[in-house]
Amino acid sequence: MTMRRPNAVRTLLPTLALLSLGCATGRIPNTDIPDTRENRELIALCERYRHAVETRDTRALLALASPRYFEDGGTPAGDDDYGYDGLQRLLSVWADEVRGVRYEMRYRRVTLDGEHANRAHVDYTFTGSYTLRRPPVDTGVNQPAGPSLRIDPVRDATASPEDAEVWFRRVADNRLELERVGDEWRIIAGM
């Protein structure tokens, strides 16, 4: 009988280890998101978005956006609101001014919208590091300074006046709002 007990323990321990691993896989790897088919679809779309940001692929970013894309700017005034056409213009300036990008996303929550079927929100924290073209200095000789993105610089970013590019870094929370169109998810706000 004493021989059976060690054998039982030897078979019980691997079984318990496998069961505990089964419990550990309840989340999509490297996220806080429950592992479901729909959540995997949403995170896959967000990863395509992240990759398009890193490669500065404005065509891919526009392809991920819904034609009904709309940003309200988060202010009561409507002068900073824009739709799909405004997104196109913004991405055009962005592609011209941004040189290098590293964009990391930590997915925190996926919420299916209870009021609107086929809508979802993906909350995440991003770390964006990028090189921006330094806008030309306005010399006062009727020379336009050119478009400029309004992006918060790193504290005490160092760049001499001769430098044509400046590194910036930003860490913030964001939400992508998504809408299912047919069999695909599209971004309707949050880029």
Image: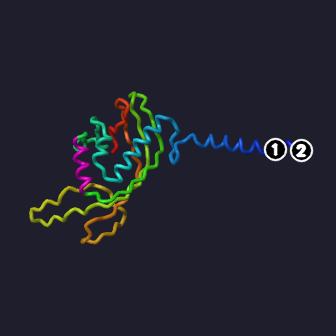
Label 2 sits on residue: 2
Label 1 sits on residue: 7
Could you tell whether 35 is left or right of 123 in the image? right
The amino acid marked with disc number 2 is: Thr
Residue 105, given in percent of the width and then of the height, sits at: 43, 50
Residue at coordinates 33% horizontally, 63% vertically from top-left? 167
In three-dimensional space, the C-alpha distance between marks 1 and 2, rounded to whole angstroms, equals 9 Å
Residue 70, given in percent of the width and then of the height, sits at: 28, 38
Secondary structure at badge 1 equals helix
The amino acid marked with disc number 1 is: Asn
In this view, 153 is above or below 81: below
**Magenta segment:** 85-96
> Where is residue 86, by image quadrant?
top left
* Position of the C terminus by quadrant: top left
Residue 18, given in percent of the width and then of the height, sits at: 67, 42
* Position of the N terminus by quadrant: top right
Disc 1 packing (10 Å; few <14; some 14–19; many ≥20): few
Secondary structure at badge 2 equals loop
Could you tell whether 92 is left or right of 142 in the image? right
